[in-house]
Amino acid sequence: NNNLFIEKLNSLLSRVSLVDILRDKYKVVHRGEVNIVQCPFHKDGQETHPSMSVDDSKGLYQCFTCGAKGNTITYLKEKEGMDFKEALNILEKDFR
């Protein structure tokens, strides 16, 4: 059932901390509801002035410099090279 899948996906995403995932590789300069993080999508994640806003409560990010935006699954697919199923498996393993 498609509705059941969407409910399970939303439940999983509500437990995921995108900031925790990003913090492993990128500098987080502000903590709280909205964090500013080094953008992984330009300058190979090595920008000196972090410009990506991450709203952990919504699981969304947007870079004000390069325009990259999306959610946790978008990040895993576009930056970590995972497909949708791989991304779900990682999230299920790390955020049960």
Image: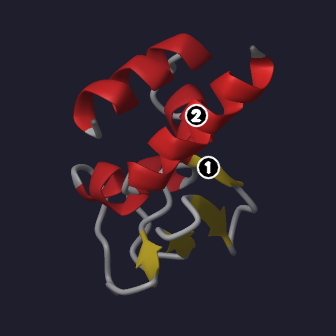
Q: Residue at x 60, y 18 (%)?
A: 84
Along the viewing direction, whichever of 2 and 52 lies nearer the viewer:
2
Q: Is residue 6 left or right of residue 93?
A: right
Q: Earlier in the sequence, mark 2 or mark 1?
A: 2
Name the kind of residue labelled 1 in the image. Answer: Asn
Q: Which residue is mark 1?
A: 71
**Residue 35: in sight, yes or no?**
yes
Find residue 9 and name its label: 2
> Up-down: is 43 above or below 35?
above
Determine the image quadrant of residue 85.
top right
Q: Quadrant of the N terminus?
A: top right
Judge the density around disc 1: few (<14), some (14-19), many (≥20) Cα neighbours within 10 Å. Answer: some
| Residue 33 in the figure: left or right of residue 61 | left
Where in the figure is residue 64, as x and y percent of width and height? 69, 75
Q: Quadrant of residue 75?
A: top right
Q: Using the rendered image of the protein, determine whether residue 83 is visible from the camera's viewpoint.
A: no
Q: Residue at x 26, y 59 (%)?
A: 23
Judged from the image, the secondary structure of the residue bearing numbered disc 2 is helix
Q: Where in the figure is residue 48, as x and y percent of width and height?
A: 39, 74
| Amino acid, disc 2 | Leu
Q: Position of residue 57 (x, y in %)?
A: 50, 70
Query: Where is residue 17 drawn, in percent x and y?
Result: 37, 56
Quadrant placement of the C terminus: top left
Q: CA distance from mark 2 to mark 1?
A: 12 Å
**Of circles 2 and 1, which is in front?**
2
